[in-house]
Image (cartoon, rainbow, N blue to C red):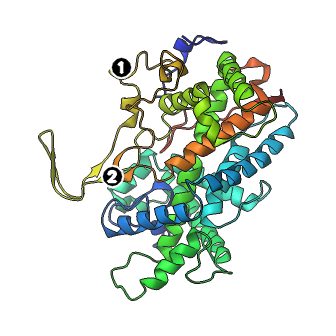
Amino acid sequence: MCSGTLDPRRTPRRASQAPTSTFVPRARLLGFTEPHAARVGLLNSRYGRGWVDHRKLAVNSFRCFGYGQKSFESKILEETKFFIDAVETYNGSPFDLKQLVTNAVSNITNLVIFGERFTYEDTDFQHMIELFSENVELAASATVFLYNAFPWIGILPFGKHQQLFRNAAVVYDFLSRLIEKASINRKPQLPQHFVDAYLDEMERSKNDPSSTFSKENLIFSVGELIIAGTETTTNVLRWAVLFMALYPNIQGQVQKEIDLIIGPSGKPSWDEKCKMPYTEAVLHEVLRFCNIVPLGIFHATSEDAVVRGYSIPKGTTVITNLYSVHFDEKYWRDPEIFYPERFLDSSGHFAKKEALIPFSLGRRHCLGEQLARMEMFLFFTALLQRFHLHFPHELVPNLKPRLGMTLQPQPYLICAERR
């Protein structure tokens, strides 16, 4: 049983303008899908050629530009330095970590998509990320769900779906400008990043009437990659920081392991992860306990199917309840307790659990899983290596998550004091 300032058993369970034709397709950004529109891109394409084409291009592009390779670790470590230096400027004073974490994490994806990072002072990019995050919440609102089921309510001049339309239009236009800028120095068939690779694919398939590659789908794909690569990893790290401040004894054990394996001034390394079972266990428990994407990404049947006697017609939306798996007592003892030791065996080695599936399973599992795991480990260890984390005046924030397509913490302040 872990101990700390609070009894772990008391930790609560996670449980203007009328739309026009231009607003509707743009609203597909950030997990919002119209039921009668052509589903293309990465997240909104549920099956068929559109999904196959875009998934294949994304996977190949990320692999080509360093994703999942040892060489990409240096890019993440460079970003962790910018991040740690930014945290240092607060000198132990209370601050909201969200913006810095979001900027740092999104820059890793930006390097793959655009070939460049954005500074933490870039207010335009920060505003776009804020709209991304807001739309993730709006997409799970009652009015947006109603719009998905009954598109005719889009004519109503009020409701959260209208705010989502406005946000999506702003994001759409901003992404268009970023893509145009990223393609200025493009050399055909010599791609330097995802945008280049996508434009090459458009050129190759320009005479194919059934091709799903287009400028509009490029914008959707870029937006989906940014939100998928930013929102989830950002919230994992924000939850991890919250729980380290909530349970200082757990934080202390992680820091003891960091000092032993990496050293107080050494550079965190992905290769050292296998030597740090407790740190690994903590991050896995955050993934289990906080259920960042509790319902995963929506899927659909590509053909008629029968599952356990139930007939599921082709095209039926299928939602996976990952939350229920992560709190199923059949797989987890005392699942409502935040207890990293459940991922350690009797010898203290890290023990993988098959019931932990935060990145989903099968052909449509998260294509950024390996990158996300590397980011989480390197940012987390770099932060705890340098700082002791605690709440201002020891005031514990609201632990109830903000509901949306993802579960993110309520806004909270943290003090990061130099160790």
Q: Which mark is residue 305?
A: none
Q: Quadrant of the N terminus?
A: top right
Which residue is rendered at x = 58% and y = 54% of the image?
69
Identity of the residue furthest to the bottom in this view: 207
Crowd band around label 2 with a 10 angstrom C-alpha radius: few (<14), some (14–19), many (20+): some
Who comes first in sequence, dot 2 or dot 1?
Answer: 2
Q: Quadrant of residue 91?
A: top right
Residue 375 appears at what percent x and percent y?
62, 45
Residue 38 in view here: no
Q: According to the image, label 2 marks what residue?
A: 299
Residue 101 appears at what percent x and percent y?
69, 44
Residue 96 appears at what percent x and percent y?
74, 37
Which residue is rendered at x = 58% and y = 38% of the image?
236
Image position of 81 with respect to 27: above or below: above
Q: Amino acid at mark 1?
A: Glu
Q: Quadrant of residue 39?
A: bottom left
Image position of 178 with respect to 292: above or below: below
Under circle 2, the secondary element is: strand
Q: According to the image, label 1 marks what residue?
A: 329
Q: Quadrant of the C terminus?
A: top right
